[in-house]
């Protein structure tokens, strides 16, 4: 009998890139059957675009009443689980990148094994929730997440395994988004209202970006922030705003920019796949000494939006002092083994299932 594994795709499209390489690799293995379950036709179509050989069985779940189907706005995860739990629990193994699915454990007769693939590699404390402990196996990108999950009692040395960062296997190619050769600044504000540089300081940040006539600027908020705030609008010819497209989630911008500007988004680690200058906005003048802001040690920190031009002018000259720090942080956050992450993740999952049999 083949091993039946279901990947539960009930989150927004940006999470897909973290699990899809492993799903495709598992589907190539003998005696493994992989299904992808989602309430979104658009998301299933995007998944299909990376699966030309149709190795994955795409299963359309019932969709609760909500706004139109979109890659960036999915219906309530709990509502989707309630509507579809009988269908989901037919699968003996469920893999997901979100933690709402831990609710399934409360369904009478629940017997599936649940595997969590932690998406992102950021430092924010909000990335560690009690529900992380409800999974039988957790795959993380590197030592940092393993260490922190165990320290918080959310996993053990046995059930938290390092599998690398498979999203890098699907990253877009570097490309030009502007017609001239000016350097490109990527501004990537996070969705956490308590920490986001955009939520409380948007007008000041936008004014500073519009003043940068010697730079091209890409404003690409985290997908969740883009759905929660009014559209960011600028008429400045050197500014490109993306409130949600494939480019905003497939690393098109992080591989194509010359400098990163942000706050607490884990995308800084996707940008640092190639070490480059980073600038962090501490506009609320927070104490940045804790783990939440560990990545702020990897570049300049500015406390006023109008300090941005000066920070950019000295970014290249200051980069050598941050290079070793960036490389060390990447080694701690993401295990960049020569073995593809998707292969390691597939091996970890199959070895775990053999042990659980």
Image (tube, rainbow, N blue to C red):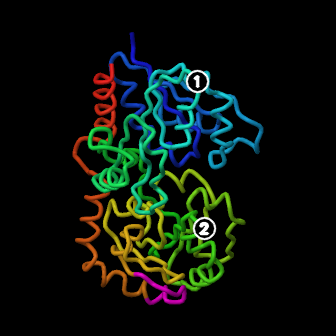
Q: CA distance from mark 1 to mark 2?
A: 37 Å
Mark 1, mark 2: which one is toward the viewer? 1
Say left or right for 307 vs 221. Answer: left
Say left or right for 317 vs 167. Answer: left
> Total number of numbered labels?
2
Along the polypeptide, which appears first: circle 1 or circle 2? 1
Mark 1 vs 2: CB contact within 8 A: no
Where on the picture, by quarter, is residue 341? Answer: top left
As displayed, is residue 219 above or below residue 88?
A: below
Q: Secondary structure at mark 2?
A: loop
304 magenta-colored: yes
Q: Residue at x 39, y 47 (%)?
A: 154
As displayed, is residue 309 above or below residue 17?
A: below
- Residue under circle 2? 193
The crowd level at tag 2 (other Cα within 10 Å; few <14, some 14-19, many 20+) is few
Q: Position of residue 47 (x, y in %)?
A: 53, 36
What main secondary structure does the magenta stretch of the protein show?
A: helix
Q: Position of residue 343 (x, y in %)?
A: 30, 35
- Residue under circle 1? 108
User: Residue 130's mark?
Assistant: none
Q: Residue at x 68, y 76 (%)?
A: 235
Q: Position of residue 44 (x, y in %)?
A: 58, 34
Q: Secondary structure at mark 1?
A: loop
Q: Position of residue 125 (x, y in %)?
A: 45, 61
Which residues lie in the magenta part? 301-310
């Amino acid at each position: 009998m083949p091993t039946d594994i279901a990947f539960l795709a009930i989150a927004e499209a940006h999470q897909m890139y973290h699990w899809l390489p492993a799903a495709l690799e598992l589907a190539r293995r003998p005696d493994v059957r992989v299904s992808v379950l989602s309430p979104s036709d658009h998301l299933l179509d995007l998944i299909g675009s990376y699966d030309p050989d149709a190795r994955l069985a795409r299963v359309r779940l019932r969709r609760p009443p909500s706004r139109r189907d979109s890659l960036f706005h999915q219906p309530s995860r709990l509502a989707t689980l309630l509507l579809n739990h009988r269908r989901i629990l037919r699968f003996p193994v469920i893999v997901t990148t979100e933690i709402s699915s831990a609710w399934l454990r409360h369904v009478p007769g629940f017997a599936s094994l649940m595997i969590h693939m932690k998406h992102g590699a950021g430092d924010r404390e909000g990335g560690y929730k009690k529900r992380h402990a409800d999974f039988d196996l957790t795959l993380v990108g590197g030592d940092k997440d393993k260490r922190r999950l165990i320290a918080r009692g959310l996993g053990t040395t046995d059930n938290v395994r390092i599998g690398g960062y498979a999203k890098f296997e699907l990253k877009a190619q570097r490309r030009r988004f502007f017609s001239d050769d000016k350097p490109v600044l990527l501004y990537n504000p996070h969705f956490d209202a308590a920490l986001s540089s955009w939520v409380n300081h948007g007008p000041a940040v936008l004014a500073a970006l519009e003043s940068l006539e010697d730079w091209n600027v890409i404003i690409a908020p985290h997908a969740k922030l883009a759905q929660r705030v009014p559209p960011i609008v600028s008429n400045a010819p050197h500014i490109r705003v993306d409130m949600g497209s494939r480019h905003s989630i497939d690393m098109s911008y992080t591989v194509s920019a010359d400098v990163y500007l942000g706050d607490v988004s884990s995308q800084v680690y996707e940008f640092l796949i190639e070490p480059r200058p980073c600038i962090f906005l501490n506009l609320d003048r927070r104490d940045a000494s804790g783990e939440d802001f560990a990545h702020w040690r990897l570049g300049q920190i500015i406390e006023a939006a109008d300090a941005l031009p000066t920070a950019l002018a000295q970014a290249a000259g200051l980069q050598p002092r941050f290079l070793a720090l960036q490389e060390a942080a990447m080694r701690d956050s993401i295990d960049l083994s020569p073995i593809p992450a998707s292969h390691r993740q597939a091996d970890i999952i199959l070895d775990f299932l053999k042990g659980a049999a």
